[in-house]
Amino acid sequence: MLAPKARWSIGNADEMLIETFVRELQIDPLVARLLVLRDIRTVPEAEQFIHGGVQYYHDPYLLDGMLPAVERIRTALQNNEFIRIYGDYDADGVSSTSLMYHLLKGLGARFDTYIPHRIREGYGLNRSAMALAKEQGVDLLITVDTGISAVQEIAYCQELGIDVIVTDHHEPPEHLPQALSVINPKKPGCPYPYKHLAGVGVAFKLAHALLGRLPEELLEFAALGTVADLMPLNGENRLIVKQGLQRMQDSAYAGFRSLIGVSGIERKEVTAGHIGFSLAPRINASGRLEAADIAVKLLTTSNETEAEQIAFELDMLNKERQLIVEDMVKEAFVLAEEQQAQGLDKVIVVAKEGWNVGVVGIVASKIVDRFYRPTLVLSIDPQTGIAKGSARSIAGFDLHKALTVCEEWLDHYGGHQAAAGMSLSSSHLEAFTHKLNELAAATLTEQDFIPLLKADAVCSLPDVPIASIEGLEKLAPFGMGNPAPRFMFTDLSLDDIRTMGKEKQHLKLALSQAKDEISCSVEAVGFGKGSLSGLITQAAKVDVLGELSINEWNGVRKPQIVMQDLKITHMQLFDWRGAGQLSAKLNMLQNNLTTSNAKNQVPGVVLFDETDVKAFAATSFQIGDSIPYWVVQDSGRLRPGNETASQLDFAQMKDIILYTIPRSLASLQSVIEQALGMMRCYPVFAELGPDSGSTLPSREMFKMMYGTLQKEGSLNVQDVRLMTSFSKRSGLSPAMIQFILSVFEELAFIERQGAFVKLHASPAKKDLTASRIYQHRMNRQEVESVVMYSSAKELEQWIAQHINKENHILEEII
């Protein structure tokens, strides 16, 4: 077995509506199903989703505050007033600022741009920047992607005689700033029908109103900020991004061409994924490590050489940012584990002096990926003691609401359900952390702490030919609110298992499946899942949840699955019988379990007899106390063999190594029945005891040996020449002689004195069957037929038949 990392949820679609879409729109049934699962209920909605078009944009004047904003800007243009665009330092803010730059430049305005420094000034408007604006003669301030919470700062602007137009998309506070105009689709009472515009989307609508036409030339900026800010790609956002991506493929802007080039992207293939994972991180790197003005300069310059130089600089900054994040993540993981060990395991709050405040949000996301807990990462200023940070959440926990409950400890905070920013005194961190954990404990269930992966449909490989996969592109661009289609494939056969990457960190499977006499094969790639290769056998049947794509190489196009998760629902057997280098195999298994995020998971070893313990300690299979081992007792129950085992429940062990050979099938069956949680079994069945071998000596042979001892009085068993001579005369092999002597010793017929054995003076009468060693040898042939001479598949089937399936761990996970 192999447990999935997440819960899998399969979408349930209205079959009649699917048929309607197929009939009316002449589309593939798979595409129709995906439309229904994206909550599209009518043919016109489906038509808009697939084909889009400028006719689907809303009237910008439906945004409350748009009319006075347009009138004030036109007045400023007529009077040649000085306008300042005030933006934010993230990719949405940079895109918004750049969009407004091109808009005002085209309108012939007298203007400049201003983005506060993340470290020196922090988020949003500040009094110093307002005072500077007055000093520099600013008449009109237009905020983009910021300002909705700046009540006091905008009041100060009014005192200075500066008019302010706020364009923003963040959650409005209870009291709005008293600006000349506040444009935000989320503003109470605003009739605008689409509420999910990015900051740059709101700026785009302002441009739409000012120009009196759709500003198609600004769509690239709107697309960049919308994707970068993780806005849902539906409704108007979908139109913006879809058309913006088309324009990026042949961009008129030197900055976009250089940024795409330095990112290694083919311009004809720019996707929303490229924005999210390549373009936006480079734009963000400027605001995180330096000043966001650099990125604005890139997106506003018309000089090709300058654009290339800035794009290269941003690329270097992004590489630097990646190294900083890598170091911080390592430190944050340690602090997160320490916090969880203290019992505060619902919400992770980690803070440290000197952390780069520009990347705390990225680090928070990494922690959520690892621990799947709402996470706050804060950097503490050693001089002021103020902790500034970012938070990322999981489904079911509203960060903004939680921070509102905790506002008594906070200096500033803002955001939404999934992400937020805040600052507070470091002296309040302990109380703040406890309160957040209390809120999460009251809100979330244990099920909520297991990630949820949603699939659109269950398919077989023959169901998705290349033509169907190509049809899925009708639903692009993919992102938040319109995820790339995911499918679940079950009962796939494994043809090959490989790893890829310099550090073998990626997994590649060759999978096949037959349906209605049609056999199909496909390659499946799991990025970052390379450690799972050692936990999958070639004979396994695999279930996969992933995205479909087409892999093209040397002109050959093949379907491919990009795996998000996989599972194996049957017990797996890894045949270690007769294998060498067992210590190396054990080390590799431990490493695989550790790197696959199997929390607190170690393999357990089973020895089938007390007599195995001493011999086991002398083998090269050295485990010390780090690996637990258990010993099978006469009753069939298991006794912990070391301190590690005594602290664990054998019934919960997932990986079990059957190290020695069972003395009977009943003892093997008893172990299997107690292994309620076993997902993977590693039979070694090594010969350690004195009763190795399967031939049972006859009673006559025992009598012959007994008679010899009576005659000789004693026997030097370490005299090689003597024992060889006796073996030839008696016809007993040296191993058989040792076995008989072991039985005699167990029955107290003989005693050992150094190298010599001799009969007891008056031994008690006992039958040979009273010897456990003798009984084991009697059962040996039956045992060997199952554990030694069976194929791996036959042994796996035998074990599977005797597994106690009640309360199985994998069943609980799924």
Image (cartoon, grey):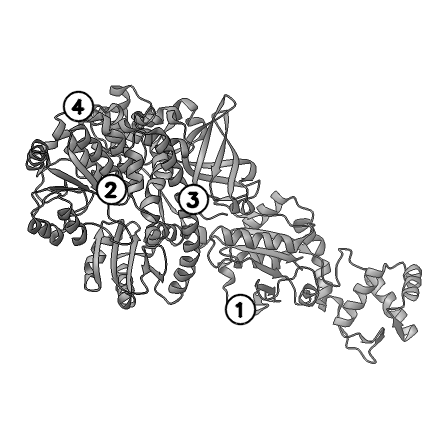
Residue 83, image quadrant: top left
**Label 4: element kind:** helix
Viewer-side label of 4, 3:
3
Q: Please state if 363 lies on the left or on the right of 108 as rendered.
A: right
Which of disc 2 and disc 4 is earlier in sequence?
4
Q: 10 Å neighbourhood of mark 3: few (<14), some, or many (≥20)? A: some
In the displayed structure image, the side of residue 32 where residue 612 appears, left or right: right
Q: Mark 1: which amino acid? A: Ser
The residue indicated by pointer 3 is: 319
**Residue located 37% across and 39% down the image:** 277
Point out the tag, 1 or 3, that comes first from the N-terminus: 3
Counting residues from the start of the chain, the first of labels 1 and 2 encountered is 2
Three-letter amino acid code of the residue under disc 4: Gln
Q: Nearer the viewer, mark 4 or mark 1?
A: 4
Left of 368 or right of it: where is 74? left
Cα separation between marks 3 and 2: 21 Å
Q: Which mark is residue 93?
A: 2
Q: Nearer the viewer, residue 53 or 82?
A: 82
Label 3 is placed on what type of residue? Lys
From the viewer's perspective, is the residue at label 1 or at label 3 nearer?
Answer: 3
Please determine whether, in this image, residue 726 is positioned above or below residue 50: below
